[in-house]
Amino acid sequence: MKKIIKLLFFISIWFLGFKTEAATLYFRPAQASYGLGQRFILEARLKVEEPEVINAVEVKIHYPNEFLTPVDFSLGDSILTFISEPEINQTKGEINFAGIIPGGYFGPIPGNPSLADILIKIVFQTPGNVILPSNSLNLHIDFDPNSKAYLNDSQGSLAQLQFENATISLNFKEPIKSDDWLSILKNDKTPPADFSPQITSAGGQNYLIFQTEDKESGLDHYELIKSPSPISEFKNLVGEKVTSPYLLTPEILKYHLYLKAVDKAGNERYAEVNPQIKPIKNYFSFYPLCFIIILGLLLFPYFSYFNKTAT
């Protein structure tokens, strides 16, 4: 009996010593029922257990594209800083996104556990008119098993990742519920946060770098506004849609530049671009006559000297 107890003790020590904590990608809600013509929000979230710390993810989501259509998404509550805009491929029924978490993510923030682990909010639309094989149909929304989470260990090691997928029941008799996404858009009266665009140089080119956030409906896009004179009233200005980094040509730098950040609800935040780098002017093309005159003045003494020595 004592030998068995000792054996169990050493086995438990062995398992504890080699235990690997896992991160989990999961959906909220994990299960729900919606009727036809219904819009709903599905949140992709990340659950982390100590002692792991995650600092980046690459996620792919599969959904049944014959019955569901992603019509929008929100990054307003995301813990991620996105490397690129999430990509929706309706033809394949896929959503791809990747992002980093500066400093790493090790679990919910005390006092705000419900919002702490959101990666992205996806707004799905069910079909308004479709023939179902029965009164209800279960639709599966899954994380791709090749999705990745990276540890904050300075080596980019892969974390052990688990998945908890979602099942959405499409019910012909289900009444239309309130549109949560529409409520978010209507109640969002706050513009994106203040931000300061920066100009930097790389490879002999000038680039505009910018980023801000919107904690309610989320950012929709940025616009670059070019004006020959300073702008004093910022309202309903329309510019070119841009993403960061944005290449600044010498021609663009001649203008007064302003950036507009627009959230999903249409609220706007403006920021002035204060260029510290001036475009290099080509004096030889803009002032050829001046160049010839200056060159002549510089060479005149030499011509005079040679004429005197020749005589």
Image (cartoon, rainbow, N blue to C red):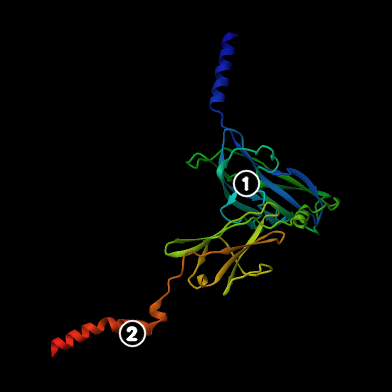
Q: Residue furthest bottom?
A: 311
Give the farthest residue toward the top. 1
* Figure check: 85 above or below 5: below
Residue 215 in view in this figure: yes
Residue toward you, 227 or 173? 227
Residue 270 image point, x, y percent: 63, 63
Q: Amino acid at mark 2?
A: Ile
Query: Measured along the vertical axis of the image, is residue 192 above or below residue 159?
Result: below
Where, by quadrant of the figure, is residue 48 drawn? top right
Q: Is residue 271 above or below residue 177?
A: below
Q: Amino acid at mark 1?
A: Ile
Q: Secondary structure at mark 2?
A: helix
Residue, disc 2: 293
In front: 109, or 92?
Answer: 109
Is tag 2's residue or tag 1's residue first in the polypeptide sequence? Answer: 1
As measured in the structure, the alpha-carbon distance from the residue carrying label 2 to the one carrying label 1 is 63 Å
Classify residue 189 by image quadrant.
Answer: bottom right
- The residue labelled by disc 1 is 79
